[in-house]
């Protein structure tokens, strides 16, 4: 047994003891974990069987980016044309945080088309629903069907990348 395989086996033992699973590489040896943002990571994290750790983290970050953008957009409505200080500050902070988090999502390897499609679709749906429920915006049945189609589109993006 050479030094490389001893180190690889030791690393594998440590990771497995922490709840990780290493998928064997093509040659039958344990695969080395890859870093964040590298396509096709072999390291699988605990909690979501079969989902690459970096994709799971990127999905959670994407949700945070969406919620930050939605908060900024709702504050935009409440800012009264940027004439009210607190909502105006929330708009700027919400958008800066949203784009900062989105940059991290993309750095972690999520495809830009998938990330932006999910972000925009969920954001539009949330804003329309929140506007109708809490802000008195009108929501016709055609718009409600459109929101349903947006949700189906997001599901298609998610299932398409699996």
Image (tube, rainbow, N blue to C red):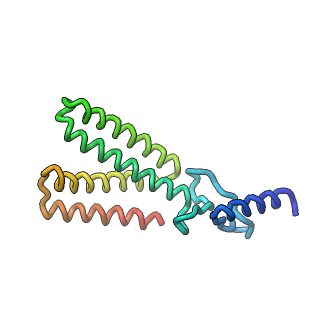
Decide if residue 11 is on the left or right side of residue 37.
right
Q: How many marks?
A: 0
User: Outermost residue toward the right?
Assistant: 1
In-front residue for pair 160/32: 32
- State the residue at coordinates (82%, 57%): 4
The answer to whether 2 is drawn above or below residue 80 in the figure is below
**Image location of residue 68, percent across then percent down:** 35, 45
- State the residue at coordinates (77%, 62%): 9
**Image location of residue 30, percent across then percent down:** 72, 65
Decide if residue 155 is on the left or right side of residue 146.
right
Decide if residue 91 is on the left or right side of residue 79.
right
The answer to whether 13 is drawn above or below residue 85 in the figure is below
The answer to whether 62 is drawn above or below residue 82 in the figure is below
**Image location of residue 11, percent across then percent down:** 74, 58
**Image location of residue 120, percent across then percent down:** 32, 52
Residue 46 found in image quarter:
bottom right
Q: Quadrant of the N terminus?
A: bottom right
- State the residue at coordinates (45%, 54%): 60
In-front residue for pair 136/25: 136
In-front residue for pair 35/89: 89
Residue 92 found in image quarter:
top left
The answer to whether 74 is drawn above or below residue 143 in the figure is above
């Amino acid at each position: 047994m050479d030094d490389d395989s001893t180190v690889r086996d030791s690393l594998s033992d440590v990771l497995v003891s922490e709840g990780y699973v290493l998928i064997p590489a093509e040659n039958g040896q344990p695969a080395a974990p890859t870093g964040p943002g590298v396509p096709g990571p072999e390291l699988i994290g605990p909690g979501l069987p079969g989902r690459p750790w970096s994709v799971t983290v990127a999905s959670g970050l994407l949700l945070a980016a969406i919620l930050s953008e939605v908060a900024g957009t709702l504050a935009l409505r409440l800012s009264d044309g940027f004439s009210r200080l607190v909502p105006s500050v929330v708009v700027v902070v919400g958008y800066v945080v949203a784009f900062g988090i989105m940059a991290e999502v993309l750095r972690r390897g999520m495809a830009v088309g998938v990330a932006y499609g999910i972000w925009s679709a969920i954001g539009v749906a949330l804003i329309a629903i929140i506007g109708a429920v809490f802000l008195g915006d009108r929501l016709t049945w055609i718009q409600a069907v459109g929101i349903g189609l947006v949700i189906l589109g997001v599901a298609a993006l998610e299932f398409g990348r699996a």
